[in-house]
Image: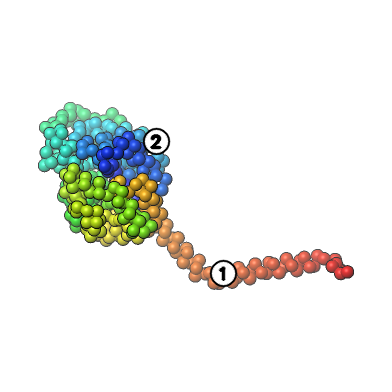
Amino acid sequence: MSKMRFGLFMPPFNSPPTQNPTTSLQRNIETIQLLDRLGYDEVWVGEHHSAATEIIADPLTFLAHVGPQTRHIKLGTGVVSIPYHNPLWIADRAILVDHLTRGRLMLGVGPGSLPTDAAMIGLEPEQLRPALAEDLDVLVRLLTTEEPVSVKTDRYELVEARCQLAPYQDPCFEMAVAATASPTGPRLAGKYGMGMLSVGATTEMGFDALALHWDVLEAEAAAAGQTTDRSRWRLMGPMHIAETREQAVEDIRYGFDAFVDYTQKTLALPPVRIPGDTFEERLAWIDESGWGVVGTPDDAIAQIQRLVDQSAGGFGCYILLQHDWANWQATQRSFELFARHVMPVFQPSQKRLLAAEAWARSKHSELDAKNGAAIQAATDRYAQEKAAQQPAGAGQA
């Protein structure tokens, strides 16, 4: 694989819900601005409508707001829950944001992760994945062709529908499908030649299925005549790092228990449910299961390398999971340490720098002696020149 990219997956987890939601949303914006300055490549923002912690209802609106406040970072929906919407309006809004951000948009799609969201619009969990497959086909046609689309389902109807505006990116912005443990995501990603967001990569089920997921994607792509590209495969996992393991643990005493309580008592999503009743039990599970990292940059490096090995061929981007485990100051420090000490390990510039350092050190003794001799020779010449310039008898009484 070539240069690995790095980013953030922002549901967002703003917990507990007693926080001021307006300032929480502002902190989400400032997080993306910080990552933009630190050289992160991309951010993915989620869509949720219930449960009081993941409070961004429309990632496309949010990203349109963030776009002018950032410079380089690519902005993705992570994800738009397609079964909740009419595909025509998803396509039109995504195209609009692609233009407003001058081609920085990425469209991540999925079935929806909060059952409470689906329940409010009368959808059962078993309906969501078939609906995703059905609606994604419609969405792709709307985005990539000029042919009118007519379709009728039990959730919407389109009559000779088409997008009046083409995407800013030609022929279309990158699209990616979320994958946790089931084969639904990789099958759809392969069928349509899309990227894959492995949001459950570090869970027990997701980790075990990593290589299988890529095999499924490749098989579906071959059957559909699509090409595959591991650089468009993103793996997600949570981390909080500090200069020492002890400091990292102390940092997350701020909000880790509130996050765990949300996974245990509110979030009806078994793959990210953290067991344990005490802080110590929960932290021990994080360490033993491999789901996340609470430690140092070296621990983060080891975790990413573990995923590279498990993927059986590599992947293109590692995305951190956004959370409020630590306070804002410690969270910023974690992002900075990750950018400074973790990201370079998986990018070609560090190899060149280390090679340049090794070469310079191999020449040190020889060149140090030559340079010292050259400096002394220059000093001696100057002294000789000054002495030669003095008139005869100068300096005598």
Q: Position of residue 318 (x, y in %)?
A: 31, 52
Earlier residue among tags 1 and 2 = 2
Residue positioned 77% across, 65% down in the render: 386
Considering every residue shown, the one lying at the far front of the view is 278
| Residue 226 placement (x, y as % from top left) | 23, 48
Q: Secondary structure at mark 1?
A: helix
- On screen, 284 above or below 149? below
Front residue of 352 and 21: 21
Where's residue 12, x and y in %?
28, 42
Q: Is residue 248 visible?
A: yes
Residue 180 seen in the current view? no
Q: Amino acid at mark 1?
A: Leu
Q: Nearer the viewer, mark 1 or mark 2?
A: 2
For residue 68, the mark is 2
Write down the quadrant of residue 149 in the picture.
top left
Q: On the image, numbered disc 1 is attached to which residue?
A: 367
* Quadrant of the drawing holding the C terminus: bottom right
**Spatial CA span between label 1 and label 2:** 50 Å
Query: Going by the image, does 352 lie left or right of 263?
Result: right
